[in-house]
Amino acid sequence: MSQSQIQLITVKKFSQHPASRPLLARDADSMYWMSRYIERAEHVARLLLVNSNLLVDVGDLSPALQDKQWNSVLTIMRSAGPAAPSNGNSTRAGTLVPRYMTFDPENHNSLITCVTRARENARAVRENISAEMWECVNTLYWAIRGDDAAARFEESPDDFYRMVMNASMLFQGLTDQTLDHDQRWLFTQLGKYLERIDVSCGIVDTKYGILQASEQRLEGALRNIHWMAVLRCCCSLEAYRRQHVGDMEPLRVASFLILERHYPRSIRYAVAMAHEAIGKIRAEVNVLAIDPAERILGRLDAQLEYAEIGEILSEGLSQYLQKIRYQVMETAAAVQKSYFLH
Amino acid sequence: MFERYEVDGLFDEMFVAPGEPRAHYRAVAERLVGMGAEAFARRVRMADVTFRNQGITFTVYSDQRGVEKIFPFDLVPRIVPADEWDVIERGLAQRITALNLFCQDIYHEQHILRERVIPPELIYAAKMFRREMFHVNVPHNIYIHICGTDLIRDRAGNYFVLEDNGRTPSGVSYVLENRAIMKRVFPSLFTAYRVRAIEDYPYNLLQCLKYVAANKFDDPSIVVLTPGIYNSAYFEHSFLARQMGVELVEGRDLIVENSFVYMRTTAGLKRVDVIYRRVDDDFLDPLCFRTDSGLGVPGLMNAYRNGNLALVNAPGTGVADDKAIYPFVPAMIKFYLSQDPILPNVPTYICAEDSHRRYVLEHLHELVVKSTNESGGYGMLMGHQATQAEREEFAQKINADPRNFIAQPVVELSQHPSLIDGQFAGRRVDLRPYILMGEKPIVMPGGLTRVALREGSLVVNSSQGGGSKDTWVLEEDDGTPVQGEAAAPVALTNGV
């Protein structure tokens, strides 16, 4: 949530088209963050789900390798990681990381933190969202915070993660179908897609790095399982298969996840949608000027439209993706400055 | 479920005597008896889930177990027949008219003080008397646009006004949500009665807000000002803003420039004409009232005094709902309207007055003593239930600051069947109707019936663990399906 800064504010007089309803700067901030946090929760839940299923599929991995897989989740989300338990219990990443990423309130990216913040933001803008959207977030909140949440998680972590993922999908559907597609809706889309770009870059960057390093040691079926897991993390396995018929070729996987034109989970698609959202916001609010956030996203959109996977790899995949992540950060800061800090 | 129900010499809303419901409650009593405990419990669960999923909560700060709570809701409705309500309605309309005339007078010519109807020192020592409002002209001379007046009944069933709440009365959102949930959970009960609708409250409120818009635009810009999501009544602020279709703002969303108020939108500053403010006077404007307030808007009072803004309710109305001024309301009605009060006050002793204070100190064990400006049931002594030590402590407080205390004889509030641990038991209730003042007074038919859930307790406030009920005011000429005659006793022990 934003804070007003004590500085000389150039007072901008109200310039919006009189027919459309004005949106409080603070409300825009909340709509944006509400969507970002829900999207983040969905990604975290999916990462944890896919990872735990992967470890079952590959069977006997050495403990060190298992830990590495779990720690990759932390790397993707840029989370510091759990403190070692002081009571002498297991320090295995396999037990610590899921709990840390699900229930730890100190972890900024844990499911409980993301859902709580999403709900707080939703509460602050209740008059701007539909009752259905509110009930969706609120129900998820109580499900995660309820007295029986820990017990349900122990009984079936998979079901728990699916609950979060499904709630996010439901929320997106409700947002699209029960909200007027005006500024309010546009800010939710902007928040959602910026978050998607950020996390997807993290997934591809981290997982690709791990897999490439162990490429020589992985054979056939095992190799496929790992690459399938990467696609699953981005909810893209089936769509990829429809195009490439199960050929888990690393280049093709990376290309699909980054550059695929039509699939909603690709980075390219998310950038295009974010660009569209910011463009429409700017058009509704301030017809003449070009918005700095729009400029960044416009350039990124054009870049991805004409990019080619070979060039990306020769530049360095990790470097390329980190540059995109950096631009997302810049966009977010620009959005905050232009629209939230009035 | 009524097996162990006792009436005990109190006025019971539902029963004349155990087993004998009043005519207008007969249908409800029959349904409840026929329903049985399990079916009723199922409906209670349904209601609870609905409350929680919709986030109809309030916040209690003294409680450590989580910050948000569901306001306990009892599913048995409280029913008021049309003829009883007619008197109440006229009495409340009369009262809000007189209170507004009083506010207008007290901040201008002060005739009521010159004529010695009220001692001036009581007014000037009132904590909520705002000198900043002297000679400020307010739109249509309306100060109290929204009032929540608390009514109680004594052992004989007579209605009394316990107090007025003319600053930022809350609770109306629960009234509206309670009704919605009752319709969902007990649709069959509604078919047996014709209940007067309350759903037009947000519309009426909006019309009142439009009425006081300072500039005569057709489409004044109206906002609800909230302290924020951590305020205990935040749900209501958000709810009313939504129902009326107006923006919900916090102090930090507003800015005053050139004595006009603007709100910060993504497209720049948009002017605001009317503020329905749910922030107390003290926190409204750090340049005028408390300087440490972060909830208000610097310069707001400036805009207000320049006539560029309407505030609902106006600042300074606390002088009218001060508990030490409350005893003079019947005198106000006489003075301004030349009428007798339709609704009586509870007899009150003002500790600021020597003879009253002496009586109070000698009879602490029989009286309820209240601070004049607290709300939420805080700062009270229930003399007949307190220990000797508590009474002595309170006596010291009274002597230290007599102006701050009033006392009233204990009124044995009426009771109403409420579900406690699977059985119905009598619990004390009060009634808070909501009155709007626009072009004319509009009294909402019904209001919040609050229930003191602890056995024997007379304190109904939510912050003290109270609950609520839906209140049904019946349409004229329609009490029950049984026409005319007194209700026959209902067998209360079948099938339970």
Image (tube, rainbow, N blue to C red):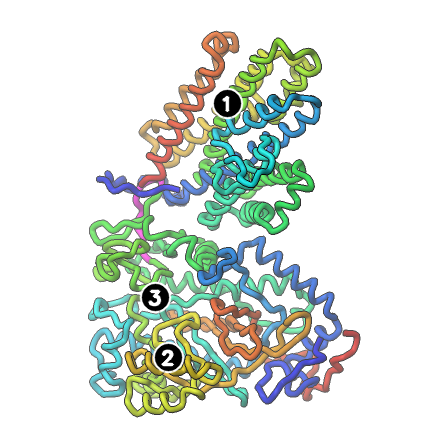
Chain letter for mark 1:
A
Residue B489 rendering spot, x and y as whole percentages: 72, 86
Q: Do the residues marked 2 and 1 share a common chain?
A: no
Nearer-the-camera pick, A112 or A294: A112
Mark 2 or mark 1: which is in front? 2
Q: Which residue is mark 1?
A: A201
Residue B216 rendering spot, x and y as whole percentages: 30, 58
Answer above or below: position of B84 versus A2. Answer: below
Nearer-the-camera pick, A98 or B412: A98
How dense is the environment of label 3, judged by Cα within 10 Å: few (below 14), some, or many (20 and up)? many
Q: Is residue B272 magenta?
A: yes
Q: Residue at x 72, y 86 (%)?
A: B488
Q: Amino acid at mark 2?
A: Glu
Q: Which residue is mark 2?
A: B393
The stretch of residues the image draws in magenta is B266-274
Res. B373 image quadrant: bottom left
Q: Residue at x 60, y 40 (%)?
A: A167
Chain letter for mark 2:
B
In the picture as drawn, the residue positioned furthest to the right comes out as B495
Q: Amino acid at mark 1?
A: Cys
Q: Residue at x 39, y 64 (%)?
A: B208
The dot on residue B16 is: none
Q: In the structure shown, which secondary structural element does the residue marked by tag 2 occupy?
A: helix
Mark 2 or mark 3: which is in front? 2
Say if residue A132 shows up in the picture: no
Q: Amino acid at mark 3?
A: Asn
User: What whole-number distance in Å separates the C-alpha atoms at marks 2 and 1?
Assistant: 67 Å
Q: In the structure shown, which secondary structural element does the residue marked by tag 3 occupy?
A: loop
User: What whole-number distance in Å separates the C-alpha atoms at marks 3 and 1?
Assistant: 53 Å
Q: Is residue B69 magenta?
A: no
Q: Which residue is mark 3?
A: B313
Say if residue B15 shows up in the picture: yes
